């Protein structure tokens, strides 16, 4: 049956200024959009939206859904719950460790803790000396653990740093309990994993949360085949109630162990598909593990080199062989330059989107940016990092350099394929997955505390919407989404506010009234008043 939506402010995202008043949906697809006076004579249900705003379903082009779904069951070590190590210890003590035999928390940022330092083993020994305690830093690249966890992992002062990882040590050489990058796995491999069924149940809960934010398509940026195959898990999760489409990016090591790439799994028309191969070139700015040319402030640290030109080329060849993307995590300018120079030896192999994506693309010079754009490399930044991790950025890089980071204005002006993403849960904000926060940061270039993040890199609200819709589709290559136009999926979000006509610093407070995927209502916010809220 046809459904006619009329009397609305509909931003199609087809171009920056595209706005209509009505659209017709049939069998999960948009069959017409235009002005109300031009609605064709068709039979069907008519819904008067009474001036409400409609936008395309939002595409989260860099997120970690399984990690996010699991972490939401752990202790949230972020404001407004946690403000100090002392509070963290007390809250962790209340956690029930029986399910997995350990205490787990996530999200701490030393810049937001009263003590202004990282959590170490002696802190977490106050939670338990009998069971392991593991707390993940906000960046997800660093964990802090107690003495029991170090004991179980066999980590002592004589344990060497694993390739691509670091074990922090005190002045006597003893491990402090802080494990960076690949060193995390020395402990994490001993933690009881969720069962496949438990993961699916958590994903179904998360799907409802994502729908409440207007998110209709997601990526899985850390897919692997062990202990469970993520592609299969998402297929089963969609059968159990997950509504969002899912584009999976498999870690290259996983692809080498067991290659899941085939004509079926990589078909972008499917609701779950494998979109690409993932590599890590470095770590994080806030953790001082991003690979940079100049040392971080008050430090001789220049980050961790986690890949090589040879590995990049090998992964690119595999991606080309199977017609998928290569997505490479890189935050530091040295890491990004290495990727761009290496990829310049290749010829792009995809025509419907970037063959190579640089995830984060935090620090990039004008020269390297031009070279990346000329080759066709996609850039996938997270301006929310500056918004909520500003203390770490100022401490590690200073204000002047921080104001140039995640430069969406520069990216757009250079003609880059780019999008706005959150990388949730890998940042220090409890509601990081809310796309309207990221839009606000991109438009205002202001941190949560008011710090000016560089006004020259501001973009408009209309551009921000496109970067979460039309342009995000280009980055993921998912078929027929990201715009409200004829022949596209009926993925759309109804808003009370006209996001183009409210103060930019109010964008983060937008709460969708309803979300539709393929024409099906998957979320509706209960309205206090009668009227349109009962019909949408």
Image: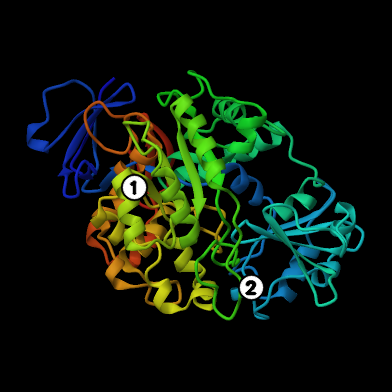
The reply, left or right, for residue 135 in relation to residue 375 is: right
Residue that carries the numbered disc 2 in the rendered image: 110
Q: Which residue is mark 1?
A: 530
Quadrant hosting residue 251? top right
Going 8% across and 32% down the picture, which residue do you hit?
38
Name the residue nearer the viewer: 515 or 228: 228
Q: Nearer the viewer, residue 249 or 65?
A: 249
Does 521 appear above or below 450? above
> Residue 459, how many percent across, how many down?
27, 61
Q: Residue at x 71, y 52 (%)?
A: 163
Q: Which mark is residue 309?
A: none
Location of the C terminus (image quadrant): top left
- Locate residue 144, reporting x and y percent: 74, 63
Q: Is residue 303 above or below residue 16?
A: below
- 22 relative position to 451: left or right: left
**Quarter of the image holding residue 490?**
top left
For this orientation, the residue located farthest to the left is 37
């Amino acid at each position: 049956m046809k459904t006619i939506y009329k009397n609305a402010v509909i931003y199609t995202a087809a171009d920056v200024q595209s706005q209509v008043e009505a659209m017709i949906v049939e069998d999960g697809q948009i069959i017409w959009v235009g002005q109300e006076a031009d609605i064709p004579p068709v039979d069907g249900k008519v819904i008067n939206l009474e001036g409400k705003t409609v936008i395309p379903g939002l595409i989260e082009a860099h997120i970690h859904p399984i990690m996010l779904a699991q972490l939401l069951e752990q202790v949230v070590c972020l404001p407004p719950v946690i403000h100090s190590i002392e509070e963290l210890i007390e809250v962790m003590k209340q956690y029930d460790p029986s399910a997995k035999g350990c205490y787990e928390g996530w999200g701490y940022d030393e810049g937001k803790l009263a003590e202004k330092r990282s959590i170490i083993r002696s802190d977490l020994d106050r939670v338990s000396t009998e069971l392991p305690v593991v707390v993940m830093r906000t960046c997800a690249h660093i964990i802090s653990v107690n003495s029991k966890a170090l004991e179980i992992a066999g980590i002592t002062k004589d344990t060497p740093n694993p390739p691509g990882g670091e074990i922090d040590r005190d002045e006597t050489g003893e491990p402090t309990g802080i494990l960076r990058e690949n060193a995390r796995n020395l402990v994490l491999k001993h933690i009881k994993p969720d069962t496949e069924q438990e993961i699916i149940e958590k994903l179904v809960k998360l799907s409802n949360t994502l729908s409440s934010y207007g998110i209709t398509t997601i990526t899985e940026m850390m897919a692997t085949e062990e202990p469970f195959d993520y592609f299969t898990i998402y297929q089963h999760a969609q059968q159990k109630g997950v509504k969002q489409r899912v584009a999976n990016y498999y870690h290259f090591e996983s692809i080498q162990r067991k290659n899941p790439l085939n004509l079926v799994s990589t078909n972008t028309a499917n609701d779950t598909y494998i979109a690409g191969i993932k590599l890590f070139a470095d770590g994080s700015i806030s953790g001082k593990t991003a690979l940079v040319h100049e040392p971080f402030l008050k430090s001789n640290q220049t980050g961790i080199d986690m890949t090589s030109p040879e590995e990049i080329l090998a992964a690119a060849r595999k991606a080309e062989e199977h017609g998928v993307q290569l997505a490479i995590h890189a935050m530091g300018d040295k890491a990004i330059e290495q990727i761009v120079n290496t990829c310049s030896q290749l010829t792009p192999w995809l025509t419907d989107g970037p063959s190579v994506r640089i995830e984060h693309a935090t620090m990039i010079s004008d020269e390297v940016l031009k070279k990346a754009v000329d080759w066709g490399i996609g850039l996938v930044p997270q301006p929310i990092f500056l918004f909520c991790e500003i203390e770490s950025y100022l401490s590690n890089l200073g204000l002047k350099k921080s104001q140039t980071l995640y430069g969406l204005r520069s990216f757009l002006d250079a003609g880059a394929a780019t999008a706005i993403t959150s990388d949730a849960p890998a940042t220090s904000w409890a509601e990081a997955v809310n796309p309207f926060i990221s839009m606000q940061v991109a438009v205002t270039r202001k941190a949560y505390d008011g710090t000016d993040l560089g006004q020259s890199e501001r973009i408009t609200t209309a551009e921000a919407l496109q970067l979460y819709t039309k342009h995000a589709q280009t980055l993921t290559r998912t078929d027929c989404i990201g715009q409200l136009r004829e022949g596209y999926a009926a993925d759309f979000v109804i808003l009370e506010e006209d996001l183009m006509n409210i103060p930019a610093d109010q964008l983060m407070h937008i709460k969708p009234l309803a979300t539709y995927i393929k024409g099906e209502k998957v979320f509706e916010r209960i309205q206090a008043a009668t009227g349109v809220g009962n019909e949408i």
